[in-house]
Image: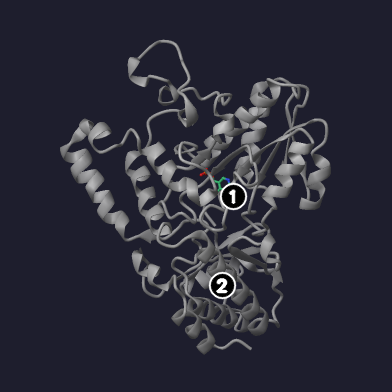
Amino acid sequence: MTTQQDCVALDAHDALAPLRAQFDLPDGVIYLDGNSLGARPKAALERAQQVIAREWGRDLIRSWNTAGWFDMPRRLGDRLAPLIGGKAGEVVVTDTTSLNLFKALAAAVHLQADGPNAARKVIVTERSNFPTDIYMAQGLASWLDRGYSVRLVDSAEQLPAAVDADCAVLMLTHVNYRSGYQHDMAALTAHAHAKGAVTVWDLAHSAGAVPLDLHGANADFAVGCTYKYLNGGPGSPAFIWVPARHQARFTQPLTGWWGHAAPFAMAPDFVHSEGIGRALCGTQPVVSLAMVECGLEIFEQAGMDAIRAKSLALTDLFIALVEQRCGAHPLGLVTPREHARRGSQVSFTHPHGYAVMAALIERGVIGDYREPAIMRFGFTPLYTSFADVWDAVEILRDVLDREAYDIHASRGAVT
Ligand SMILES: *Cc1c(COP(=O)(O)O)cnc(C)c1O
């Protein structure tokens, strides 16, 4: 049996514990939703003031050069690259995950259409993928109007067989947003390549959550989010990775002026920039983009191996305590127990999942709810303690034991 004292002792020996002081978290809140919107680095407030008051307010348009605004997508990309196993010059922080996925997918389709695999017209993904990924793929397929289609697969076990002679692109989200299931990136990429397909990986729930090695896996393209585990702030720009080996043939349809070889030549014809600049489109939300750096700075003090070790300890503890203390209630573990298959969240079903989560949030335990009946708890080692896990499970137990939830609670637009 794990006790509260055990959890306090784990915190006392946790080398990452001091990093929590770099985040602003309100008193009385146990924040288990950093997988959806990361907490605010304290440094972000000062940085926002600097960007708004000095760079925008005083230096005005000169800041594109003097404050490095124009280079920011590349500079932040270089800083983010080590977290995903990419190299400098292979990542830009720009646009949204949905848009970057569209670009990466278009480039992957083009790579295939331009070679011996031109007859392949199917994009394979999972039905359980985050819907925007499916929608963007469907949108691209229908706009191309050249016979492309999206094939939705029902389970991870069925994926290998779905990558057949018609498959052009295998597009997967590495860690599932709902279940927390983690794919074997290296194995699936090797399988796709052996079958003649190229891969697009969405790292929205992986970057900053689990160690990643895109080069080690020989992946083809990747995109991801900065406002989840990377703590970039609400709606902060996403990232796209194009390895050096694919950059010369990387083309995408959103050929805005930021992707031009000489944007300020103002020429009427589009000429691709060299390198990762090809993934850019247009002017970025500078204030929001600047906040991404504050999150990345904290990661540089930690290292993904230490983060992963604590993440697994936190999620193991949460599963064990829920099973010990809430065992009489109809909770179903959705997230894999096997470490290699688990991201940094734990999902449980409950017949009244929405109402139970609403009651938890009311009491300061902030997770979230995803259809159908799934309560999601995200564990972010930079600012979540073992004592938090204990307290969260105690509150869950109390809410369930006393049935202190309202099954008729009304729902906001965002769950
Ligand atoms: C969070 C998430 C997104 C978000 O896309 P936006 O364009 O930022 O709205 C996309 N895909 C996956 C897999 C996600 O988890």
Disc 1 secondary structure class:
loop
The spot of residue 151 in percent (x, y) is: 76, 37
* Residue under the point 60% across and 28% down: 107
Q: Is residue 34 left or right of residue 180?
A: left
Q: Which residue is mark 1?
A: 213
Asked if the residue at label 1 sits under 8 Å from ligand 1, the reply is: no
Inspect the image, locate mark 2, and give the three-letter code of the amino acid beneath it: Leu
* Residue under the point 36% across and 38% down: 72
Disc 2 secondary structure class:
helix
- Label 2 – label 1 distance at C-alpha: 23 Å
Quadrant location, the N terminus: bottom right
Tally of numbered discs: 2
Q: Which residue is mark 2?
A: 314
Front-most of 243 and 101?
A: 243
Q: Is residue 9 left or right of residue 263?
A: right
Q: Is 294 situated above or below 305?
A: above
Q: Residue furthest left?
A: 58
Which quadrant of the structure image shows residue 314?
A: bottom right
Quadrant location, the C terminus: bottom right
Proximity of marks 2 and 1: CB atoms separated by less than 8 Å: no
Between disc 2 and disc 1, the foreground one is 1
Inspect the image, locate mark 1, and give the three-letter code of the amino acid beneath it: Asp
Characterize the local packing of mark 2: few (<14), some (14-19) or many (20 or more) Cα atoms within 10 angstroms.
many
The spot of residue 214 in percent (x, y) is: 59, 45
The spot of residue 388 in percent (x, y) is: 48, 76
Give the color scheme: rainbow, by chain, secondary structure or one colour: one colour
